[in-house]
Image: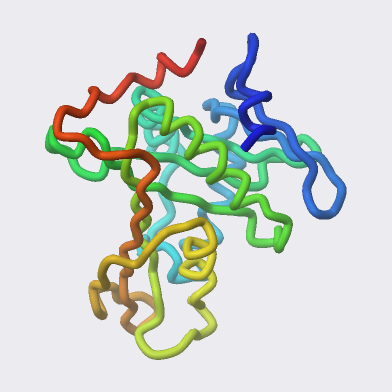
Amino acid sequence: MDSVDKTFEGKQPLLFEDKLTDGSSLIIRMASLDDVDSLLTIYNYYVEHTAITFATQKPSTEEFTQLISSTLKDFPFLVAVKEDKPIGYCYAHQLGSRGAFCHSVELSIYLDHKVRALGIGAKLYEVMEHLLKQQGILNLYACIATPVDKPDEYLTDASLHFHHKQGFTVVGTLNQCGYKFERFYNLTWAEKFIGPHHNHQAPKRTKQSLLL
């Protein structure tokens, strides 16, 4: 976390740079609308070839543009860049639309399926957690697709194991609630606390308050 703290100082507080396990440089920055096509390519692989997302139709460019725009109004939408190419992204949104969810967010993360075992997902979560703490967020949630009985060609337990390594705890499972590729899948909810809870909790801060 020291490397994150140092990177967030100064005139470019939302830029993070570090070395990956293969020795190459990784930059994490806020998304822009220029990233839409690259990030759609990453996501569409999971729509077409996996049950990691329960989406069965690829979103349009307009829909994905709206996702980035609406997210950035309130929360970080991060992009991981390796050798000038976006290779993954992570974003947060409030857990529910009601006001009492103001300190809780759900995270979504997708990496280029050709990128393996370089620690990119962990770095994205590290930066995201740092930013959300600054906003006064206390609870992180992940909604993870999981196999009903055993892994298959469309879904493994890799995402569940990843979140466990990042400090998430499973809090419940919706059994056989998703149907894709002519079979059913579960959804497992995982939770992580990143701050103390008080009866008189300070209000959540806006994303703009991160731009110090």
| Number of numbered discs | 0
Colour scheme of the picture: rainbow
- From this view, report whether residue 75 is shown above or below residue 56: above
Residue occupying the far bottom of the picture: 149
- Comparing 37 with 189, the one in front is 189
Residue occupying the far right of the picture: 23
Give the image location of residue 141, x and y in percent: 34, 52
Q: Quadrant of residue 75?
A: top left
Give the image location of residue 42, x and y in percent: 58, 52
Q: Name the residue rendered at 61%, 22% in the picture.
A: 8
- From this view, report whether residue 17 is shown above or below residue 141: above
| Image quadrant containing the N terminus | top right
44 horizontally vs 119: left or right: left
- From this view, report whether residue 64 is shown above or below residue 131: below
- From this view, report whether residue 196 is shown above or below residue 51: above
Give the image location of residue 9, x and y in percent: 63, 16
Q: Name the residue rendered at 75%, 41% in the picture.
A: 82
Q: Name the residue rendered at 21%, 35% in the picture.
A: 198
26 horizontally vs 62: left or right: right
Give the image location of residue 6, x and y in percent: 67, 24
Q: Name the residue rendered at 56%, 37% in the picture.
A: 127
- Comparing 184 with 1, the one in front is 1
